[in-house]
């Protein structure tokens, strides 16, 4: 573990070693403590591309000759790779490269997949060399966004041994510690009036925590930070750490889903898919539906596979949690929290509807009526609404009567529909 001291406010906090690079701001004074690093040597193509952007600015992405020249000068041990890059990534691809570095990570992954296909089909490049170029562009993009290429500034870092703490000062995430964090954000002049008791602690609990605690309680506290509940300052970073504690130390499945939702909202498909993969492995309906999405799109940690996607939806049905399935499907229909994916929403609803979910039958019927994610088909919509009515769905009969009023007499006969 590491102990970090901010040179701006003298505040200290404790983090796990593998969380060191993720620190962005001081939790005590909110000062920025992270900056991009400059490589001393360029031993890979992604570093060389990133180095060119750092030295010459984004404009170098529109001058591929200048980019190749910089890489040749700074990475002479990669001459073969650079020559293949220069011959393949010609001026025809300038617009793709420029767009790529303007996109977020999730969108950029789609662009890189398209480039890979073009390199293979249009330029005749082997799959291995196409992968080399695309992986280099992806790595440079991550470096340029400060992912995997950061350094801590304005702080002092030292080792911290948990065993050196006395028992009464070990930190757990409780309501009392929340109050301590809020107090630690007060101006220093006010803090002088506080009593110096052994219970005082300026280390924010949302940065350091122990493996003890109630996983459900941790998630409840995390949600208060994430939503900025009354009495809590909105802090996504603190929320993620608490969700991670509940997930990593307690294998609490709802925590996997909370983390998956957060990263989906941020359009970070790799991170989202890793958490949803854990949820799916625990046989959770939401996790299985979301992994179906990742398989259908070929996003995140999995390759595209329609067969695997169908398998995920089938497994979700087997859990019997149709409420979760319909909730995920409706989010895909609406867009926002999840990408707007009407076809995927229909696939999820169809799987649940066939298993007898009246909610799924109702929403799928609406999709057939409006032609959302599937070709419009009034006959199928009517069949689904009838099934939902038979299952006692609260709104299905009303919708069926509305649909009845819009049909001609011959259509009512055709669909065997009576008032």
Image (tube, rainbow, N blue to C red):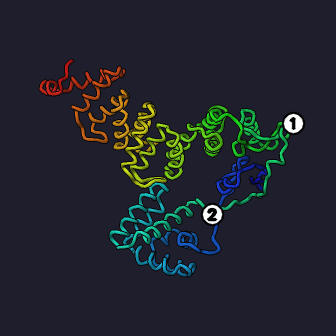
**In the image, residue 196 lies at what x, y percent?**
87, 38
The secondary element bearing badge 2 is classed as strand
**In the image, residue 289 lies at what x, y percent?**
43, 41
Q: Is 311 in front, or is 167?
A: 311
Q: Neighbour class for label 2 at 10 Å: few (<14), some, many (≥20)?
A: some
Is 113 on the left-hand or right-hand side of 235? left
Could you tell me which residue is drawn at 63 percent across and 44 percent down?
248
Q: Neighbour class for label 1 at 10 Å: few (<14), some, many (≥20)?
A: few
Considering the image in quadrants, where does the C terminus appear? top left
The secondary element bearing badge 1 is classed as loop
Q: Mark 1 highlights which residue?
A: 197
Q: Is residue 234 visible?
A: no
Could you tell me which residue is drawn at 40 percent across and 69 percent down?
127
Q: Is 188 in front, or is 221?
A: 221
**In the image, residue 20 lies at what x, y percent?**
69, 55
Q: Is residue 415 visible?
A: yes
Q: Residue pushed farthest left?
A: 410
Residue 75, quarter of the rendered image: bottom right
Q: Residue pushed farthest top?
A: 419
Could you tell me which residue is drawn at 34 percent across and 39 percent down?
346
Residue 363, quarter of the rendered image: top left
Q: Mark 2 highlights which residue?
A: 36
312 is higher (above) or lower (below) than 81: above
């Amino acid at each position: 573990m590491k102990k970090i001291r901010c040179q701006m406010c003298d505040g200290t906090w404790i983090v796990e070693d593998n969380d060191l690079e993720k620190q962005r701001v001081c939790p005590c004074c909110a000062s920025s403590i992270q900056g991009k690093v400059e490589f001393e040597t360029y031993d890979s193509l992604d570093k060389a591309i990133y180095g060119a952007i750092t030295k010459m600015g984004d404009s170098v992405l529109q001058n591929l000759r200048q980019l190749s020249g910089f890489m040749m000068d700074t990475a002479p041990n990669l001459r073969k790779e650079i020559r293949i890059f220069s011959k393949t990534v010609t001026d025809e691809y300038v617009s793709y490269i420029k767009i790529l570095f303007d996109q977020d990570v999730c969108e950029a992954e789609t662009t890189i997949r398209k480039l890979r296909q073009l390199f293979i089909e249009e330029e005749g490049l082997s799959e291995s060399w196409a992968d080399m170029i695309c992986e280099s562009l992806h790595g440079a993009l991550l470096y340029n966004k400060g992912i995997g290429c950061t350094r801590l500034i304005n702080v002092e870092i030292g080792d911290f041994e948990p065993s050196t703490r006395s028992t009464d000062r070990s930190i757990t995430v409780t309501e009392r510690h929340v109050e301590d964090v809020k107090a630690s954000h007060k101006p220093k002049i006010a803090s002088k009036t506080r009593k110096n008791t052994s219970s005082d602690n300026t280390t924010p609990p949302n940065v350091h925590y122990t493996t003890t605690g109630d996983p459900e309680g941790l998630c409840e506290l995390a949600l208060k930070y994430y939503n900025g509940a009354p009495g809590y300052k909105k802090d996504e970073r603190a929320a993620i750490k608490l969700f991670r504690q509940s997930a990593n130390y307690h294998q609490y499945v709802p925590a996997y889903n909370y983390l998956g939702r957060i990263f989906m909202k941020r359009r970070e498909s790799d991170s989202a898919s890793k958490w949803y993969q854990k949820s799916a492995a625990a046989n959770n309906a939401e996790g299985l539906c979301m992994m179906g999405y990742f398989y259908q799109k070929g996003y995140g940690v999995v390759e595209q596979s329609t067969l695997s996607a169908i398998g995920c939806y089938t497994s979700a049905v087997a859990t019997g949690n149709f409420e979760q399935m319909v909730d995920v499907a409706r989010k895909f229909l609406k867009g926002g929290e999840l990408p707007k994916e009407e076809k995927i929403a229909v696939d999820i609803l169809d799987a649940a509807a066939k298993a007898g979910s009246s909610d799924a039958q109702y929403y799928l019927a609406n999709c057939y009526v409006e032609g959302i994610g599937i070709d419009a088909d009034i006959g199928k919509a009517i069949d689904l609404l009838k099934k939902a009515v038979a299952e006692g769905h609260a709104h299905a009969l009303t919708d069926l009567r509305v649909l009845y009023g819009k049909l001609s007499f011959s259509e009512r006969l055709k669909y065997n529909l009576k008032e």
